[in-house]
Each structure stands twice: as C-alpha cells, then as structure tokens.
Amino acid sequence: MKRILITLLSCMLLVPSFGSFFVYTSFKLNQEEISKTICVQRKMVFNSCNGRCELQKSLKKYADNEKKMQNNLKEKAEVVYIQNTATANFKLVTPIESAAKLFASFDEKPISVSNSTFHPPSYFI
C-alpha cells in the first residue's frame, strides 16, 4: 500500500514538468482535425501551417498559466509560517558538594561601613 501511495505522489509531482509535452502530444494526435477546423490558414490552397499556429497559441497559453501559478505560489509561500517545537529530554543531575572555603569570618563585628556607591571608571563610558 505504501509503495502505491509513494508512486502515485511521485507521479503527481512529475506531471506539471511534462505539461508542454502533453500539449504537444495532444496537438500531434489531433493535428489533422485542428488544421481543417481551427487553423487560421485553413482556407488557403497550399497550407504550410498545418495547425502549428494553434500549437503556438496553446503553448503560450500553457506558459502564461504556469507563470500565474508560480506567482500565486510565491504569494502563498510568504504567508505560510512554520513553528518548530524543540523537545529536549532534561535529566536531573545531583549537585557535587565541595568544601566551601571561607575567607572571611563573620564572627567579629565589622570595623567600618561604606555608604558610597560603586561607579565604574569613566574611560569605559
């Protein structure tokens, strides 16, 4: 079932790239009818066009439709936003206890108190 789905989706992706091929093939299959009914030069005695004028019109029409589709896709692509959510597995790690070295003892009373505020040096500003 998966292979059928994959093949079907792949073919759907490749079909637009063969659009002009399909237009040309349909022209070749119906060339005699087109040259007798639709062609601009059908009433001429020595008709050298054989419906190629209609082929050119069809190919131009197909190319214009492709350009319109590309423009529509560009406009739609600007509107689409994708949000990726990152999922991370965090583990709790036990903290490593280390013997803290105290450089000052708080048993004694302070000698003096400073009321001034720290100001950084002026050459860094």
Image: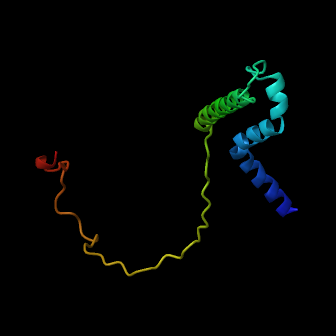
Q: Which is nearer the eye, 75 or 11?
A: 11
Within the image, what quadrant is residue 34 found in?
top right
Q: How is the image coloured?
A: rainbow
In the image, farthest residue toward the bottom: 99
Query: Is 35 rendered above or below residue 22?
Result: above
- Point 75% across, 37% down: residue: 23
Q: Residue furthest top?
A: 43
Q: Which image quadrant: the N terminus?
A: bottom right
| Left or right of 5 on screen, residue 85 | left
Vertical side of 67 occupied by 89: above or below: below
Q: Is residue 50 above or below residue 20?
A: above
Query: Residue at 59% of width from left, 67% of height from top?
Result: 90
Residue 81: percent from the left, percent from the top? 61, 41
115 up-or-down from 3: above or below: above
Residue found at the very far right of the displayed protein: 1
Q: Image point 19% across, 49% down: which residue?
A: 115
For the C terminus, the image quarter is top left
Q: In the rendering, at what x and y percent does residue 82 appear?
A: 62, 45
Horizontal side, residue 96 vs residue 78: left or right: left
- Picture coordinates of residue 78 (x, y %)? 58, 36
